[in-house]
Amino acid sequence: MSELRTLVAEPWTDWGLIDCGNGRKLERFGHVRVIRPEPQAMWAPAALEWTADAEFLPGSDEEGGGRWVQHSRLPASWPLARDAVRYHASLTPFRHLGFFPDMAPQWDWMRERSGAAEIMNLFGYTGVGTLLLSEAGAHLTHVDASKKSVEGGKANAALSGLTERPIRWMIDDAAKFTAREVRRGRRYDGILLDPPKFGRGPTGEVWRLEEHLAPLLADCRKLLDENSRFLVLTVYAVRMSALAIGELVRQTLADLGGTVECGEMAVREEARGLLLPTAIFARWSRS
């Protein structure tokens, strides 16, 4: 396995990290500016004062959660774009806005390798990655346990004019669906996994990253073969190491050959160009 890499999401027309520091970050999502908590921004911000349309105020350690405070009247959702794909942004109860911009380098990397491939997107959320791969020509199987997220993905497909693309939208538990695909003898050219630290399936199935990731990866391996092209794993659990998930992917896919790389994902701040770390990743590819 090669040295740790850092994949950097650069600003684009409809998104950018404007400034960050003192445990917060100021971002632009189209015409909307928001402030969100960011524990890793331990340094001082570039500007002393920020102006935003909305701010997410976290709850106490005891109560968890948090809430959005709007300083300007915002619509329930508004459209953004990356390349030819359009999607909705909104102020969700989970402090994010319906997609994860730090995934942009992974999306671009997979698009270069997908073509007319068969790709499975596990924990696919609202489908921005699914649509970007579909727009590049791939056939997609999009899996998420949340009906609301899958419906959001379909709405994004309609917004992008991609409703006729070959996409299977599956409301299902990722681990159970993958196991069934193994029993069906299915194969894929590429797999993307973006699992949460903890979650529940549509019928109450419990997902714990440290406990269930290795078995899920083992089943993913059974869906790949000597002609497959990639597997991408991204993890937002702070206590897990990129080296650990890199070794897990390397051992699980060792018989396929190819290369495994791992490291950190980050976004570039517009004010000073510094990098704000967001997640860790490991990915296998044939090339």
Image (cartoon, grey):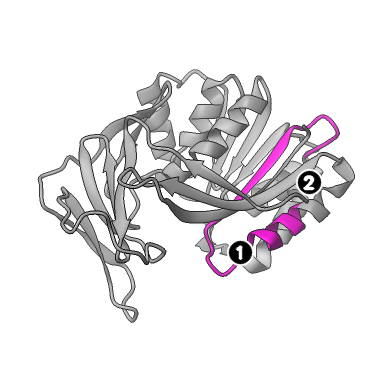
In percent of the image, x 43 and y 38: which residue is there? 10
As drawn, the residue found furthest toward the bottom would be 62
| N-term mark: 2 or 1 | 1
Q: In this view, does 210 lie to the left or right of 183?
A: left
Give the residues in magenta: 224-249
- Give the residue at mark 2: 221
Mark 1 surroundings within 10 Å by alpha-carbon count, few (fewer than 14), some (14 through 19), many (20 or more): some
Q: Distance between the residues labelled 2 and 1?
A: 17 Å
Callout 1 amino acid: Leu
In percent of the image, x 48 and y 49: which residue is there? 266
For the question of whether residue 183 can be seen, the reply is no
- Give the residue at mark 1: 209
For the question of whether residue 96 can be seen, the reply is yes
Q: Taking 86 as reference, is 267 above or below it?
A: below
In percent of the image, x 37 and y 45: which residue is there? 98
In percent of the image, x 83 and y 36: which residue is there? 225
In the image, 215 versus 1, the foreground residue is 1
Q: Does the magenta stretch include residue 171?
A: no
Q: Where is residue 58 in the image (x, y as percent from the top left)?
A: 28, 68
| Picture quadrant of residue 14 | top left
Element assignment for label 1? helix
Q: Taking 262 as reference, is 192 above or below it?
A: above
Q: Position of residue 79 (x, y in %)?
A: 29, 31
Q: Is residue 248 left or right of residue 163?
A: right
Position of the C terminus, as image quadrant, is top right
Element assignment for label 2? helix
Q: Is residue 239 magenta?
A: yes
Callout 2 amino acid: Arg
